[in-house]
Image (cartoon, grey):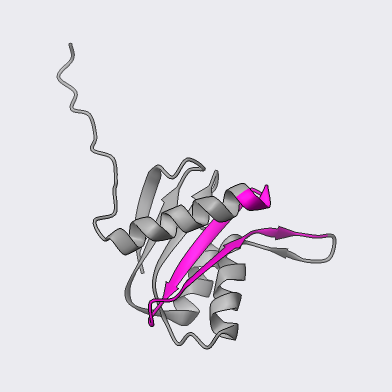
Amino acid sequence: MSGAVAEEPLVPEDPEDLKLITLARAALARGGVNQGACIRDSDGRAYAATSVHLEHLKLSAIAVAVAMAVSSGAGGIEAVALLGEQGPSAEDLEILRDLSGDGVTVWWADGHGTVLSMIEL
């Protein structure tokens, strides 16, 4: 056996962040698309969305979830979960910064909900 130590998997400590991952995973499964996301606003409301790929409209799951939050009156966000093969793009992070509060956590997980990384905005 080698002396390498297995890296501990990233797991959100806050049950509300785990809920975001679960809701994003459900959206991903329902939508049959390549991304699912869920945002929790500063009032504790959650907005789950998928990416949109139409002939004349292409939006990331994060962009759709932010639009849903803003159109529902959200003034800020607390946390985000993105599920899919690709992590949040630079544009996604800029969109989140437009609405973010202090210390927003962005969780990126695969389609099974296994967290791959965490970003603090």
Is 6 above or below relative to 24? above
Residue 95 visible, this angle = yes
Instruction: Tell me where residue 55 sits by quadrant.
Output: bottom right
Specify the segment rendered in magenta.
30-54
Residue that extends furthest to the top in the rendered view of this protein:
1
Q: Residue at x 48, y 85 (%)?
A: 74
Q: Position of residue 53 (x, y in %)?
A: 75, 57
Of residues 4 and 51, the one nearer the viewer is 51
Q: Position of residue 8 (x, y in %)?
A: 23, 38
Locate the N terminus and report the quarter of the image it occupies.
top left
Is 21 above or below relative to 104? above
Q: Position of residue 58 (x, y in %)?
A: 73, 63
Instruction: Tell me where residue 12 sits by quadrant.
Output: bottom left
Q: Residue at x 38, y 81 (%)?
A: 42
Residue 33 is covered by the magenta coloring: yes
Locate the C terminus and report the quarter of the image it occupies.
bottom left
Of residues 90 and 100, the one nearer the viewer is 100
